Amino acid sequence: MTRTTYHYEGGLLVPRRKLLVSALAAGAGSALGFPALALDSKPLKGVTLNTSLYSSPYSKLLRPWIPEFEEATGAKVNFDTPGFPVYNQRADLELSTKGAAFDAVNVTFIYSSRWINSGWLTPLDGYINDPNKTPANFDIRDFLEGALAPERGRDGQLYGIPWQAEVTIAAASRFDVLKQSGLAFPDTTDAWLEAAKLLNRKERAAGFVTDNHYGWTFIPFLQAFGGDVFRKAPDDLFPTLDSPEAIAAADYFARLLREYGPDGVVSYTSDQAVQSLKAGRSHLSVQGQINLSQLADASSSKVAASAAWGQVPKGVAGRFPGTAIHGWGIPVGSKNKDAAWQFIRWATSKETLQRAVAAGYGSPTRRSDIDSPLYRERQRANGYDIAALVTASVDLSAKQGHMKYRTVAAYPQVDQQINKAIELIVTGQRTPEQAMKQAQTASIAELRRAGVSV
C-alpha cells in the first residue's frame, strides 16, 4: 500500500503531489503561515507540543491524524486525553499556576469564564488577524457566532477556537419496543418516567441510563421542574438547590437512575452510557447529541435500525436543553505559543473538521459543516433529523438564556456539589431533601471561598 505524504499549502494539509503542482504554478508560497519556506521545510522541527483534550469522539478521530501534522511540520505532539473529570482537575490546577506543562488545552465550557477572565489563557486575535500566521482560508467567520461567544473574554478578545457545540437531546435505543407497548416517544417528564418504568428489564435492558456528570445531565430536569442552579445568573449567584422544585426534580431524577438504571449506574461515564445504549442494554437516555447520534452508526451500534431521537422532555416550567461549547486554547504559560497556534489552526481548520464530519463527527462548530449535505444526511436516521433537533435546541437555549448558570466562573464548584447530591440520593445515603440542602450549604460555602458575594 502506498502511503500518502502531506505538506501544508495555504494553511491546509494537502497530498504532496497536489502541493508540487500548485507550488510550480504559484511559487513556494507559505507553510503554516511562515513565508518563503522550501517545499521540504519542517517549520516546527525540534518543537515538542504538549496538548491535552478530554476523551471524546473528536479526540478519538484526531489522534490518528496527528502524525500527518507532525510529518508536515517536524513537530512532535504529545496528545493527552484523560476522562472529563480528570482532565478538568489537571487543567484547572495547571492553568491556575500559569505553568508551562501544556501548550494547547481544551477550554472547558463550565470553566471558560474562570480560565479566560482570570488571565490564564492567551488571547488569539493577534494570531487570527496576522496573515503570516493565519491564512484567509481559515475563515474565523465560518464558526457559529453562538460557539464563539463563550470563548470571548470581558475584553472582547477570543481565547478559544470551538471544536464542539454540544446540545442535550433524548434518545430511545429500542423505540420498536416502546411502540409495541402503544407509547409514542416521550415528550414530557411524566411520559419519560412512564416509558422508563414500562421498558425497564424488557429485552433484558435497563429503562434509563445517562452519564454521571449530573451537573450537566440533571439540569434539564431541574429547570423543567421550575428549579434552577442560581437565583438569577449571572447577576445573582445565590444558589437555589434546596428549593421545593429542586428537591422534587432531584427525587424524580434519582428515581430514574435508582429504579430503572443499570447496576452501578452512578459510576457510568458518558462513554459507558453510550456503549450500554448501542449494545441494547439500556433503553432511554438524555445526553449530548455527540454521544446519542452514535446510536445511528450501523457499524458499531446494534440498535441503529430501531433508535429514535427527540428533544429533552419538557416539564411544568417548559423545555430546557443543555448547550455546551468546548474549544482549543493556549495557556498563558506555554513556551511554544506560535507552534501551539499552528496546531490549533490545523485541528480546527475547514479541512480537518470536514474530515471529521465525513468520519461521522456529529457536533461541528463551523456553519459550512452544519449546512453541508453530508452532515445533514448523516444526521438523518430512521426518519429522524438529529441536526434539526440540535438547531431547535440551540435556538431555544439562545432565546430563553437558561444556560447562563453554566458560564459563570464559580459554577464548577457548584457542579461538584450537584454531582455529589444526586449520587447520595441514588445510593440511598441521603433523602432528596437532605442531599439538596447539603448541596445548598456546601455551594454557598464554596462560592464565598471563591469571593462571590451571596
Image (cartoon, rainbow, N blue to C red):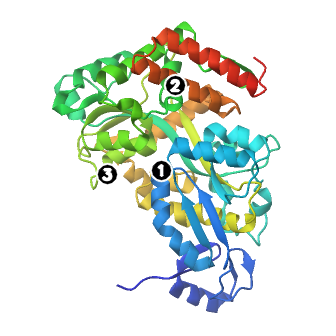
Please state, as top left, top right, bottom left or bottom right, where the C terminus lies in the image: top right
Reply above or below: 127 against 3.
above
Q: Image point 68% across, 60% down: which residue?
A: 103
- The residue carrying mark 2 is 420
User: Disc 2 residue type?
Assistant: Lys
- For marks 2 and 3, give the one nearer the viewer: 2
For marks 2 and 1, give the CA distance.
23 Å
Q: How packed is label 2: few (under 14 Cα within 10 Å), some, or many (20 or more)? A: some
Observer able to see residue 444:
yes
Query: Residue lying farthest top?
Result: 244
* In this rendering, position of residue 42 left or right of residue 396: right
Residue 383 can be seen, yes or no: no
Q: Is residue 47 above or below residue 17?
A: above
> Dot 3, crowdedness within 10 Å: few (<14), some or many (≥20)?
some
Q: Which SS class for mark 2?
A: helix
Task: State the CA–CA distance, disc 3 to disc 1.
Answer: 16 Å
Depicted 50 relative to depicted 324: above or below: below
Relative height, residue 394 to residue 137 (above, below): above
> Reading the chain from its start, which is encountered first: label 2 or label 1?
1
- Residue 170 place in picture, x, y as percent: 39, 32
Q: Which residue lies under the disc numbered 3?
A: 297
Quarter the N terminus occupies: bottom left
Which residue is at the front of the view, 332 or 2?
332
The residue positioned farthest toward the right in the image shown: 155
* Residue at image mark 1: 56
- On the rendered structure, is 176 left or right of 6? left
What residue sits 50% from the left and 9% below the top? 433
Residue type at tag 1: Ser
